[in-house]
Structures are given as C-alpha cells and as structure tokens.
C-alpha cells in the first residue's frame, strides 16, 4: 500500500513539473540598407514538457520584444513671450529604443499588476530608471510623455491579442519593426503563464545592423565625428551653391 502511494505521488509530481519553451524567430539578423521600409518579425515556438512531449495544459503566452537601451534626456517645451524654450527636463537611464508586447489575452486578464511589473509585461510597467531625485508625480508625467511619443513613432506598441496558441503546443506572434528602428541587439523574451504565475520563460535574440553604404557612413561618423560634421557642412554649402546657380539660370 505504501509503495502504491509513493508511486502515485511520483506520478503526480512528475505531471506537475513546469513546462519548457522552445522559442524561435523568423530572422536572427536584419540588414538595414538604403530604402529600408521596415520588416515584420515572426516569433514562434512550442510549449513542451521537460521530456519533450506536448505540455497539454491551458497556458497563456506573452512575448516581449525589446531593443537596445540608452540613457535619454526628455525636455519639456514651454512658450515664453511667443518663443518655445526648454523648461523642465528628466533623464532616464534605460529607455529602450524599441518595445513591443504581444499576448494571447489582455495582460490584466493573465497576471496581476505585481507580476506584470516584475516582468515588464506592458507599457504601464516599463522600467525606465529615472536618474536623480524629483517629485514622483513629475516622474510619472515625464515617463508617460516619453511612452506616448514613442507610441506615435511606432517604436512602442502593445497587442493584447497578438499571440496565437494552437492546441496548447505551438504559438506565434508577428511584430513589425518600423524603418526608423535603431541598430543593435534585440531580445525576444517569451513567457508561459498559468493561473497568474509565470511557469516558463525563454529568450531569443535578433541583431539589427546596417550594411553597404549606410554602414560605411555610420562607422565613419562614429570613428571620425569632427570630420563627418565638417563634410556634412561642406556638402550642405555645396548643394546650396549649386541650387542657387541653377535658379539663377532659370
């Protein structure tokens, strides 16, 4: 009898083990050339048991695609005597160049706010890491302003029904990168969630880089900032001179 009970416990414990995620992306490298108009990434994978078979439970999937982070200074414009001038400002240590969240259901129906904040499962819980001490109300106002601006630019986005899950085994999500996307390493983190708890996560990476003439220009600008600025001024002056001569002949 004891042996049967022990065997039953082992079976139950074995069946209760958390699943694993096997993620993949359609492109591990995105090449930015002249005329680049953006691209669409397909993020897909499978939810499996540790033995490699079908997990078979009711899981929700959330995919977070995040671009390289940079420090940024956000300045507020104020009209003074008919002239727009810089007023208040705030600096953030880790503002991502791109941030997109796709999920199988709206986030508030999958996890509570604490869990969403821990894993940054949405724009309201994005951690921007402000620098310096200032009023929390002002901090939230500047954070909301930064998020709103990048949403308008297509660099921050959310899709509460952007993940399709097939028979609780396969999942897929499509996220579009705009033409203004920044180069660097992007992380695509996938979360499997059951009963409000993250039970598995996995990361895939995508490299966005410039190639061809654009790459040469970018490298020259990074390595020779002064010469690049001087050449830019000379080109501008030359184009202005040529345009002036052409108009004079008309």
Image (cartoon, helix red, strand yellow):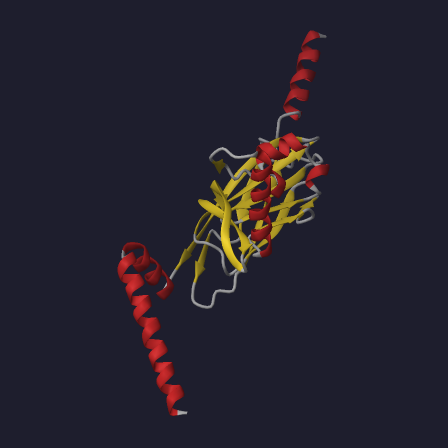
How many numbered dots are placed on residues in this image? 0
Q: Position of residue 85 (x, y in %)?
A: 49, 54
Q: Position of residue 205 (x, y in %)?
A: 48, 45
Q: Nearer the viewer, residue 78 or 117?
A: 78
The outermost residue toward the front is 81
Q: Quadrant of residue 135?
A: top right
Q: Nearer the viewer, residue 76 or 36?
A: 76
Is residue 68 at least partly visible in the picture?
A: no
Who's the residue at 40% across and 87% down the image? 247
Q: Position of residue 94 (x, y in %)?
A: 47, 41
| Horizontal side, residue 8 vs residue 226: left or right | right
Q: Position of residue 48 (x, y in %)?
A: 61, 36
Q: Nearer the viewer, residue 195 or 24?
A: 195
Is residue 123 at least partly visible in the picture?
A: yes
Q: Quadrant of the N terminus?
A: top right
The outermost residue toward the bottom is 250
Q: Quadrant of residue 50?
A: top right
Q: Nearer the viewer, residue 63 or 43?
A: 63
Is 220 situated above or below 167?
Answer: below
Who's the residue at 47% across and 35% down the image? 132
Who's the residue at 43% across and 53% down the image? 183
Is 5 situated above or below 172?
Answer: above
Who's the residue at 28% across and 55% down the image? 223
Is 225 situated above or below 1?
Answer: below
Q: Quadrant of the C terminus?
A: bottom left
């Amino acid at each position: 009898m004891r042996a049967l009970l022990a065997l039953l416990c082992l079976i139950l414990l074995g069946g209760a083990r958390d699943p694993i995620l096997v993620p993949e992306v359609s492109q591990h490298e995105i090449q930015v050339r002249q005329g680049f108009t953006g691209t669409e990434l397909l993020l897909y994978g499978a939810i499996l048991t540790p033995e490699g078979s079908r997990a078979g439970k009711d899981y929700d999937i959330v995919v977070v695609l995040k671009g390289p982070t940079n420090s940024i200074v956000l300045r507020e414009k104020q009209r003074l005597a008919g002239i727009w001038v810089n007023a208040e400002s705030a600096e953030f240590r880790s503002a991502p160049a791109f941030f997109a969240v796709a999920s199988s259901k709206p986030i508030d129906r999958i996890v509570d706010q604490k869990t969403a904040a821990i894993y940054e499962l949405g724009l309201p819980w994005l951690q921007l890491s402000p620098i310096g001490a200032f009023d929390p109300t002002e901090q939230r106002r500047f954070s909301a302003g930064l998020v709103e601006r990048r949403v308008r630019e297509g660099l921050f986005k959310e899709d509460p029904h952007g993940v399709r899950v097939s028979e609780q085994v396969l999942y897929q999500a499509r996220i579009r990168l705009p033409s203004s996307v920044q180069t660097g390493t992007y992380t695509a983190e996938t979360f499997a969630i059951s009963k409000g708890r993250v039970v598995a996560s996995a990361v895939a990476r995508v490299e966005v880089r410039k190639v061809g003439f654009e790459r040469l220009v970018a490298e020259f600008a990074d390595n020779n900032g002064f010469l690049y600025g001087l050449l830019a001024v000379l080109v501008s002056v030359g184009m202005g001179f040529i345009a002036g001569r052409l108009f004079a002949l008309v």
